[in-house]
Amino acid sequence: MTREIDIECPSCSPREEVAHEVLKEGQSPLVRCMKCGQVHPAKMKTPKNVSLRVIVSKMDVSNTFKTDLDSETVLQVDDELVVDDEETGMVCPILITSIEAGGKRVNAGRAEEIETVWGRAIDEITVKFSAQEGTDKTEVIEKRVPGDYEFVVGAEEKVGNTRLFITKIKVRDGLFRSRKGDVVLAKYVKRIFARKGRREGSIQGGSRRGPW
């Protein structure tokens, strides 16, 4: 997330405000003009906070919360956002899946313009494995892990008493990771394809991720 402000640019727009990216906050703020790229000091207005409506999906349940943000904060689809609802006490990191502003779905917007944000909770994720056994039998197996848990193509992954050898991973943008050693965080996983049992020469997974 970056903060943007509208101010005059001494290089390309000395009389009209244009969008700038804030590079440095504090008593001597620096900004970059998003029109011409000029970096210059700026007099900053004190930002106001807005209460943002956020619909959080966790497993098969969705709940509505409120979180306070700087009004000029720019949010984008696929950004991570920590929802901190003071009324309910709920604090949860989410991955933004959709944004509504001006009565329509958009890919990005300023907090003051946004009406609703939808997101998936990524504190814990249920990951689905398509586990192949032999040539004609496939079983769907689920594992619940933290959102930052690493899955590695070529590694062995233990789910309960079952050992799986990861062959490829489908991520949420629709692409696949199939090169040995490719790492995908759980929060970005759509589905993992694996074979049951152990294969010689596989990467030993889990050693840097803790016991799960």
Image: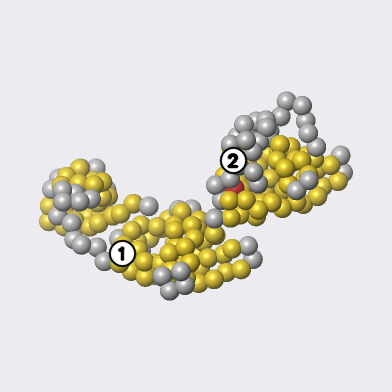
Label 2, label 1: how many angstroms apart (C-alpha)?
37 Å
Numbered disc 1: secondary structure: loop
Closest to the observer: 144 or 75?
Answer: 144
Quadrant housing residue 47: bottom left
Q: In the image, is residue 154 above or below residue 212? A: above
Q: Please identify, in this view, whether the residue under mark 2 or under mark 1 is nearer the observer.
A: 2
Q: Indicate which disc, 2 or 1, sits on the residue closer to the N terminus.
A: 1
Residue positioned 62% across, 35% down in the render: 207
Residue positioned 56% across, 51% down in the render: 147
Residue positioned 60% across, 42% down in the render: 210
Residue 119, horizontal then vertical, whole percent: 51, 61
Residue reaching furthest to the bottom: 87
Q: Identify which amino acid the numbered label 1 is placed on.
A: Ser
Residue 40, horizontal then vertical, whole percent: 16, 45
- List the residue tagged with mark 1: 71
Residue 129, horizontal then vertical, whole percent: 72, 48
Residue positioned 19% across, 49% down in the render: 29
- List the residue tagged with mark 2: 209
Numbered disc 2: secondary structure: loop
Q: Identify which amino acid the numbered label 2 is placed on.
A: Arg
Closest to the observer: 23 or 158?
Answer: 158
Packing grade of label 1 (10 A; few <14, some 14-19, many >=20) is some
Quadrant housing residue 192: top right
Closest to the observer: 193 or 36?
Answer: 193
* Residue 35 can be seen in this image: no
Packing grade of label 2 (10 A; few <14, some 14-19, many >=20) is few
